[in-house]
Amino acid sequence: MLGAPGAGKGTQAKLIADMYNIPHISTGDIFRTSIENETLLGVKAKEYMNQGLLVPDELVLELIADRLSQADAKEGFVFDGFPRTIPQAESLTKTLNKINSGIDLAIDVSVPDENIVKRMAGRRACTKCGATYHIVYNPPKVEGICDIDGSELILRPDDEPETVLKRLSVYHEQTKPLIEYYKNSNLLVTVDGTLAIEDIFNTIVKVLGA
């Protein structure tokens, strides 16, 4: 799944994973699980993260290969948030080739920057459990209060307009070239991310031939 921060690719990735009963794989989840289980790779990743450093691509790919070796990934998987750069995409292709696997489709959830800034400015997160809401699209039952535990909801620093614009700048510089990369590989499908969540998913389902 490709798309800018806040485009909704994570939501669509989870819906696809649920429909096909395959794992939704994000590097963040892999890191957390490996660290919690204190695997050898998880311990290595934690060393970098504790120093505020990015986990090297080689280690990320080892973690992904380990995740794909698990039984639930034998029938397929959905990547969310990886790869982020051309070198990562090239290395991922090599890693998948080694296990006789590959990418069937790269789905780009396309949303204009101005829409993303407005969308993310409406996000709210629980200060305790981390549950997320949106003041327009998914409001809590009581304004400013989490439905789950009654804690305060806040606008996270990551979702403030100035920060979002910086994240979008990084995306356009580092990650957007992936669209051309997968287009040249005849794997790219672009969907309109400004539509309702259900409409976007229905479009993807048609593309997947489900």
Image (tube, grey):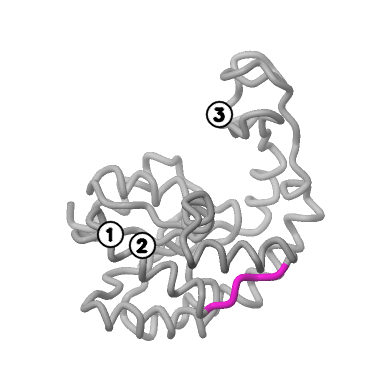
Inter-mark Cα distance, 3 to 1: 34 Å
Q: Which mark is residue 67?
A: 2
Q: Quadrant of the N terminus?
A: bottom left
Residue 80 lies in the magenta stretch: no
Secondary structure beneath label 2: helix
45 relative to 82 in the view: left or right: right
What predominant SS class does the magenta segment belong to? loop
Position above or below: 9 against 128? below
* Label 1 CA crowd tier, 10 Å (few <14, some 14–19, many 20+): few
Instruction: Find residue 109 and report its horizontal and vertical position in percent.
Output: 46, 58
- Residue stretch in magenta: 53-57
**Residues under numbered marks 1 and 2 in contact, where contact means CB atoms less than 8 Å apart:** yes
Q: Nearer the viewer, residue 107 or 40?
A: 40
Identify the residue under disc 1.
70
Q: Amino acid at mark 3?
A: Asn
Res 197 → quadrant: top left
* Label 3 CA crowd tier, 10 Å (few <14, some 14–19, many 20+): few
Q: Residue at x 51, y 85 (%)?
A: 87
Identify the residue under disc 3.
138
168 relative to 63 in the view: left or right: right
Position above or below: 180 against 84? below
